[in-house]
Image: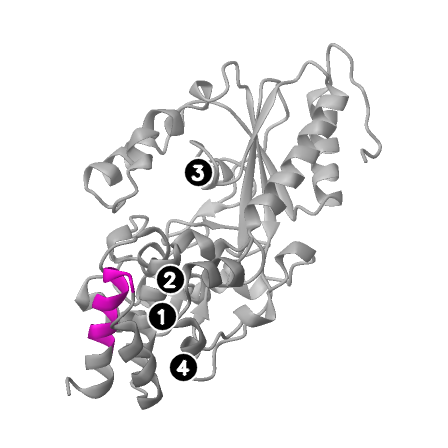
Amino acid sequence: MLRHCINYGGRHDAGRLTADIRNEALKIGFAKTGFAPAGKTPFMAHFRDWLRDGLHGEMRYLERQAEKRGDPELVLPGVRSIVVAALNYYSGETPPSSPLEGNISLYARGADYHPAVMDRLKRLLRFIKSAVPQANGLCYADTGPVMEKVWGAETSVGWIGKHSGLVSRELGTRFFIGVILLDIPLAYDEKSEALCGDCRRCMDACPTGALAVPYRLDAGKCLSYLTIEFHGTVPPELRSLAGNRIFGCDECQNACPWNRFAVKTTVEELTPRKENLAPELLSLAGLSREAFERRFAASPVLRASRDGFVRNVMIALGNSRRAEAVPALKAALLDESPLVRAHAEWALKSVTGGH
């Protein structure tokens, strides 16, 4: 239900409307909202260089969408404003206590974040359209050719950190980003000051050296990419560095000093599921496709696919060096997936010393 919605008629007061949008965004759960004028992103040269150097791994969709990502006019003709909204997902630290427990990235321990962000964005867009009926808009939350974090850095929401993620002075790094493209003018923020300074804690914390160069993430070495987006054979030299991470990696965020200001989310949908806090690896090693889909229904973990996820579990069991893992690893040698079988073989050798 829309609250305190003012119809501005054919012409609107951009400053007043922007203040009303910001207030409404807070009411529906967004922790911070920013506003930027639309235009070609100044980040585009950096993005093209990153693609040219192959640092995006096998995420070919980024190449196909490159031009649209650089120019929101190609996404929404007539676009004039970009609204950036941050949804806090921080739920507190609960690290696994046993080598036989897996680690799922903090953001993925609850329900899929896309509906949580998109539902709120759509509510906010309805609020805007009720105030300015002629307004047209499109909502995105990691769902299309829009660089959300780049636009976030064009507002007061935050700045791009050396780990290439968006950092907020008030929120740290643990928040989802939603964007609304609008064809009406608004009052725009001053950009947030970049406050990383000489700090390189995120770079030093990366287990695989994927952040060897500031602001240039090498996806091919990133454990988040390898455990989620990449569905192939994980390079042997990176497997032992994955530890017990079975979906994502939070090390660069854990190291960021701005996260000391993080407060726990009040967004109910993002509350972690108990079974995802420190899942038992042995119970995940033999998941069938059907069991995987049931176990992680409406969860971001589905993104990894069953074979990719069980591959990750094999690596984590290998890194556990625990004899209790041997029966599950031997059973996985007969798995229907060649990908799982290959990583189970490696893991078994890691646990038994090759015997």
Q: CA distance from mark 3 to mark 1?
A: 33 Å
The answer to whether 172 is drawn above or below residue 101 in the figure is above
Label 4 with label 1: CB-CB less than 8 Å: no
Q: Earlier in the sequence, mark 3 or mark 1?
A: 3
Label 2 with label 3: CB-CB less than 8 Å: no
Query: At 33% across and 54% down in the image, what residue appears?
Result: 225
Label 4 with label 3: CB-CB less than 8 Å: no
| Amino acid type assigned to the residue bearing label 3 in the image | Val
> What is the x, y in percent for residue 313?
36, 70
Q: Which mark is residue 150?
A: 3
Q: CA distance from mark 2 to mark 3?
A: 30 Å
Query: At 63% across and 26% down in the image, what residue appears?
Result: 187
| Amino acid type assigned to the residue bearing label 2 in the image | Phe
Q: Say what secondary structure mark 4 lies in.
A: loop
Q: Which mark is residue 313?
A: 1
Q: How crowded is the residue under tag 3: few (<14 C-alpha within 10 Å), some, or many (20+)?
A: many
> What is the x, y in percent for residue 181?
55, 26
Query: At 54% across and 56% down in the image, what residue appears?
Result: 297
> What is the x, y in percent for residue 23?
74, 39
Q: Which residue is mark 4?
A: 100
Q: CA distance from mark 4 to mark 2?
A: 16 Å
Label 2 with label 1: CB-CB less than 8 Å: yes
Q: Which mark is residue 309?
A: 2
Q: Say what secondary structure mark 3 lies in.
A: helix
Q: CA distance from mark 4 to mark 1?
A: 10 Å
